[in-house]
């Protein structure tokens, strides 16, 4: 009998403690999310950090999963502005100070509590438009798979690396290097749907072609050896369409070749208030690395 009384006493003491712990936990969770939201609302856009586009494939996949799961659990939000994976990406970039390589995507609780207020903020809307332009149209890696025994391409993060031709400057792109260093060997395809906005010779870019994707980003392919036959300014292109072949043109008058190793220089630009903003293609290439068309050479 005493044992039962003791058990009931312990239970009576534990229940309030558990309830208090649960309430405290929820309050702390609420306070923490509120601090994060207010911090994001107070931030100005850090363009240097934004332009680096640090996001891993793993984190991008997680954003898409979280966004999809959130809409499944809250179907009444489907189709609402800023209730998509681009909004979740924008929210996550602010949350992690533009670093989704070394930091984690926020959970759906924080996103749900914050997106309503952030989506009314002009800075958030501008960032959203940037990320939408960059990520909405990505379909293929720019160099097709050539077969197991074919030469390969390699690339590294050379964003802002020094360049000296034409004066001291910073590298605003990613170079995809040809393992065999043979001009005309690797075909270059369009990463996105879009249309040919610019085409022809540039002293620094050699034979170059610029594709304006449907959501607004400009994809710049430089140092081509030759262009795809018949391609001209104004033509509509589809993702995966041949643009030309990798080469070593540029750094001189029209027709100059051989000033550097064979490679594709890929640049990605956004138009904003009559200016161009370059962004780092490296992490974008890492995301679409497994999306390669196949072409046996």
Image (tube, helix red, strand yellow):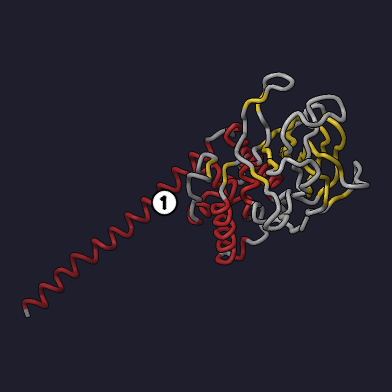
| Left or right of 184 on screen, residue 16 | left
Q: From what the image shows, is residue 29 above or below residue 165? A: below
| Numbered-mark total | 1
Q: In the displayed image of the protein, which residue is found farthest to the right? A: 230
Quadrant the N terminus occupies: bottom left
* Residue at 52% in and 39% down: 97
Q: 170 and 5: which one is in front?
A: 170
Q: 244 and 70: which one is in front?
A: 244
Instruction: Answer with the quarter of the image where residue 297 lies.
Output: bottom right
Q: In the displayed image of the protein, which residue is found farthest to the top? A: 167
Instruction: Answer with the quarter of the image where residue 204 lies.
Output: top right
* Residue at 77% in and 57% down: 295
| Left or right of 79 on screen, residue 231 | right
Q: Position of residue 277 (x, y in %)?
A: 70, 33
Instruction: Answer with the quarter of the image where residue 94 lies.
Output: top right
Q: Position of residue 155 (x, y in %)?
A: 64, 42
Q: In the displayed image of the protein, which residue is found farthest to the left? A: 2
Q: 108 and 196: which one is in front?
A: 196
| Neighbours of disc 1 within 10 Å: few (<14), some (14-19), many (20+) | some
* Residue at 66% in and 52% down: 288
| Left or right of 200 on screen, residue 38 | left
Q: Assign a secondary structure to mark 1.
A: helix
Q: Position of residue 218 (x, y in %)?
A: 76, 40
Q: From what the image shows, is residue 84 above or below residue 121? A: below
Q: Position of residue 250 (x, y in %)?
A: 80, 30
Q: Which residue is mark 1?
A: 30
* Residue at 55% in and 66% down: 73
Q: From what the image shows, is residue 278 above or below residue 62? A: above
């Amino acid at each position: 009998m005493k044992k039962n009384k003791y058990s009931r006493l312990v239970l009576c003491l534990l229940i309030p403690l558990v309830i208090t712990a649960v309430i405290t936990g929820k309050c702390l969770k609420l306070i923490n999310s509120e601090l994060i939201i207010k911090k994001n609302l107070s931030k100005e856009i850090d363009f240097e950090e934004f332009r680096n586009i640090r996001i891993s494939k793993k984190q991008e996949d997680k954003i898409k999963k979280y966004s999809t799961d959130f809409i499944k659990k809250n179907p009444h939000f489907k189709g609402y502005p800023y209730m998509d994976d681009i909004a979740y990406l924008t929210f996550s970039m602010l949350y992690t100070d533009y670093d989704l390589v070394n930091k984690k995507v926020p959970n759906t609780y924080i996103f749900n509590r914050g997106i309503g207020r952030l989506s009314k903020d002009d800075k958030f809307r501008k960032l959203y438009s940037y990320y939408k332009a960059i990520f909405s149209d990505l379909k293929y890696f720019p160099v097709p798979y050539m077969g197991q025994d074919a030469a390969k391409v390699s690339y590294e993060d050379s964003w802002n690396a020094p360049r000296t031709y034409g004066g001291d400057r910073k590298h605003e792109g990613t170079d995809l290097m040809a393992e065999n260093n043979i001009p005309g060997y690797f075909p270059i395809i369009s990463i996105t749907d879009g249309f040919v906005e610019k085409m022809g010779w540039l002293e620094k870019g050699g034979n170059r072609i610029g594709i304006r994707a449907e959501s607004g980003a400009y994809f710049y392919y430089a140092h081509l050896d030759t262009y795809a036959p018949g391609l001209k300014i104004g033509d509509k292109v589809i993702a995966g369409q041949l643009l030309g072949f990798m080469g070593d043109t540029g750094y001189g008058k029209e027709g100059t070749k051989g000033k550097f190793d064979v490679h594709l220089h890929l640049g990605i630009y956004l138009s904003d208030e009559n200016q161009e903003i370059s962004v780092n293609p490296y992490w974008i290439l890492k995301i679409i690395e497994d999306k390669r068309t196949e072409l046996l050479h």
